[in-house]
Every structure is written in structure tokens, then in C-alpha cells.
Amino acid sequence: MPNNREPEKKANHNPIRILIFIIICVATNILLSKITMLLQLPFSLDALGTILAAVIGGYLPGILVAFLTHLIIGLSDFSSIYYGTLNILIAIASTYLCNKGLLKRFWKTLIFILILSVISGGLGGLIPILFSNFNIDKYFTDFIYDLSDKTVSVLTIILIITLIPEQVRLSLHLRRWKQAPLGPDELEEIKKVQCRYVTLHSKIIFLLAVILSVLSLGATLISFFIYRDTLIEKYTGINADVGKQAASIIDPSRVEDFIEKGETAKGYIATEDALQLIYGTVSDVEYIHVYQISEDGCHVVFDLDTEKATGNNPGDMIPFDRSIESILTDLLVGKDVRPIISKDSNCTTMTSYTPVFDDNKECVCHVVTVSDMSILEKNKTDFFSKMIFLFLGFIILIIATVVWFADYNIVYPLNSITHAANEAMRDKTNLSAKDFEKLQNLDIHSGDEVESLYQSLIKMLEYTNIKQDK
């Protein structure tokens, strides 16, 4: 295995320097996005900092820059959250493709640009489908836009990489070795260590993905239920207030006269105008009806005209809706009933019933207020989409952080021990002094059980070698 550790050993991995680099990349994303927007350029360059951090710093800095960029922008424009996950995917792809050498040759660079454009423009262009405003012409136009954007971004990054000295670039790559540093070729070699079933690296990713997905799903559902209950409570309060106001202006002693004579009844027009005034001041209430509910149906007392429908005439009888069958008995005696939420193909409504009593505490009619709750259904897709994109980005960030920590503290040291031991004993029956020195040179210092295992192995091999020498 070639020894290419020297550049890695000389690189000074200063956490403060890497943190400053990440902050600069986040600021670059935000500033370039604002500047290109002001200048009305045909590209935004809002992922340039992300790609730069991913290419130089590795997976975790790239993902962190993407997440922080859209988290900050999301404070003023929450729609950017949808594209935060795409930017994270761009960071992952950039690191992977760079490690595969796709920035070293011109034709490979074209593939690099195309893949990033497919993620940004291809996948990003499908997001409007969530809101039923997808336009195929705009989709291809946006893809061309993203292609030019990524072309300028990648070419700029290649220029920046060329100008930065190698030692500086290596010092900005986020590493935290708990052993003697490994060069790129050595790292690829230890990653090839075979396992009987599943690697520890894969187990960690799978376990984290399952746990975080379940937690995110639970948090999303709980948040939605809280949002839904809050909205229902809001409309319940609005309907109750409007119902009480309307009930307070209706003269219970005149209800029978209103039903029989309609607009010719004394006080009917004045009461209807007062109801119309209440209706005009509350935008959340779609309809206000006043019905006398009897066993044979609902007799119209007042039914206000709206932009959507013309009201029924006084005295008209409306058959019971199935939705009130369970509360009909309570309505007939004037008991308070819970609001009814109904759904059909067109909308979701909340209907509330406020009883009007005469001096003998007899219920003479009900004020029926109907609110349009379609906003709940309309916002459901928007809400779940935002939560999924937000949590998905957060899940990827957490997984990347834990995997990075596990790789440098557990996986790489264990794989290095395994690889060195396999190499030492390949086609041999005894451990040579050179092979033993290679094991010692691993210098594993994780400070945990892995280091204890390593030290025990070294001591055992030392003892074995002494016995063999004797």
C-alpha cells in the first residue's frame, strides 16, 4: 500500500480555521444570492459556498453550510426550506464526485456540472407539483437556468482551488484522526475491509435513519394535530361570538311573526340589516342563517344573501342535514351542542348553533353560523411538505455528524487494525518485525475501548514475538 501520509501529516487541522471557513461559505451563499438578484443576472450562485465547502472541507462542512444557509434565509422566506434539502444533496454529491476525481479533467467536470444541475433544476423543478402549479415549459427553462448557474459556480470553484495552496486546502478538510493520519489511498484501502454481514458504518447509518425518521414523523404529526386543534378552536370561538351577537338582536317574541309574514313583519327588515352588518364585519364566517328547528325540519327565519348563494325565503322549510341527526334532540330543547365539521369534495366547513330563548327560557330558534375551514385542507399539503423537507435536512445533518464522529473514533481505527493484521498474516505463519512495526505505527489514541483493544493486541504480539524468539 503506497505511503501518501506526508501531506496529511503536515496539514494543520485547526477547528477555528475550519469554523471560519464554514461561516465564510454560508455568507458567500447568502450574499451572492442577494447580489445576483439585485443585478438580475441569469444565475444565482446561491450554492457556490456549499459546493466549495463540500469540495474542500468534505461531507460534513458541505452539509452544514447548506443547512445553515437555508435556515438563515428561511427566517425571512420560509419557502427556501424546500430547497435546503436539495442544497444538502448538492453538498453530498459534490464531495462524492470530487473524491472520485470528477474535477480533474474537463469532460469529467462537465459530468460534475450536469449531475448538480439535475439535482438542483431537475429535482427542484418538481417541487411546484406539491402546490399544483407545475408548468412543463417553466420546468425546462429553470433547468437551463440551473445548468448555467452550476457551470459558473463550478468553474469559479475550480479557479479558487487552483489559487489556494495545497497545505491550506488540506487544513480546511474536516478531520479528527484518533490514529496516525491516513492518506487518500490508505483510507480507500481500509474501507475495503470485508465483513461477514453488514459493516459497522452501514449499521450506524441505518439505525440513525430509522430512529430519526420515526421521531421526525411523530413530531410532524403532533405539530399538525396541534395546528389543526388550534385552528378548530379559533373558528369555534369566532362562530360562538358571531352567534351570540346575532342572537342578541333577535326579538324572540317576533320569531313566529317573522316566519309567517317575512319582510312585511314589523321589525324584520331592521333585524335583517343588523344581521347583515354583523356578517359584513366578520370575514371568517361564510353564512349566517336563523332557523327554527322543529321535528319536521328547519324553518327559515332569516337567511342572508352572500356572494356565493342567495338566501332562502322566510318560512321555507329545509330538510335536516345528516350531520345534525346525532344532535337533533339537543337542538330541539335548546341545549348547547358542539360545532359540526363537515367535509365534501369542494370544501370543509364548521357549523355552529346558538339558541335564542324567549322570556320563558324556551328555545324559539337558532342562529346557525357557517365558517369555511378549507384553509385546513389547503395548508395540510403545504404543512407536511415543509415539515418533511425541514426534518429531512436535519436528519441528514445529524447522520453526517454522527457518522463522521464514528468513522474517525471507531470505524477507521478498527479497520486499520484489521487491515494491518490481515496484511501482516497474509501467506505467513509468523509476524515479521516490519509488520509488527506497521501495527505499532497506527498509533491509535481514541481514549476508549478501541484504544484498549489496540494496546492489548500490541502487548499480546510483543509477548508472542518474545516467546518465538526464545
Image (spheres, rainbow, N blue to C red):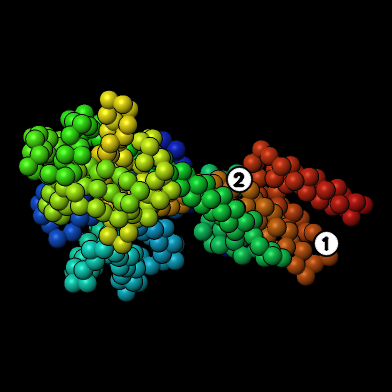
Pointer 1 local density, CA inside 10 Å: few below 14, some 14–19, many at least 20 = few
Pointer 2 local density, CA inside 10 Å: few below 14, some 14–19, many at least 20 = many
SS label for mark 2: helix
| Of marks 2 and 1, the one in the foreground | 2
Residue type highlighted by circle 2: Asn
The x, y position of residue 66, in whole percent, is 35, 49
| Quarter residue 74 falls in | top left
Residue closest to the eye, 208 or 350: 350
Residue closest to the eye, 281 or 126: 281
Task: Let me know if residue 25 appears in the view.
Answer: no
| Quarter residue 245 falls in | top left
Q: Residue furthest bottom?
A: 107
The x, y position of residue 414, in whole percent, is 67, 52
Residue type highlighted by circle 1: Asn
Task: Let me know if residue 415 appears in the view.
Answer: yes
Q: Which mark is residue 409?
A: 2
Mark closest to the chain's N terminus, 2 or 1: 2
Residue at 20% across / 31% down in the picture? Answer: 253
Residue at 50% across / 47% down in the picture? Answer: 218
Residue at 39% across / 46% down in the picture? Answer: 328
Q: State how many labels appear.
A: 2
How far apart in space, not on screen, are marks 2 and 1 (Cα)?
30 Å
Image quarter hosting the N terminus: bottom right
SS label for mark 1: loop
The x, y position of residue 220, in whole percent, is 44, 47
For disc 1, the marked residue is 430
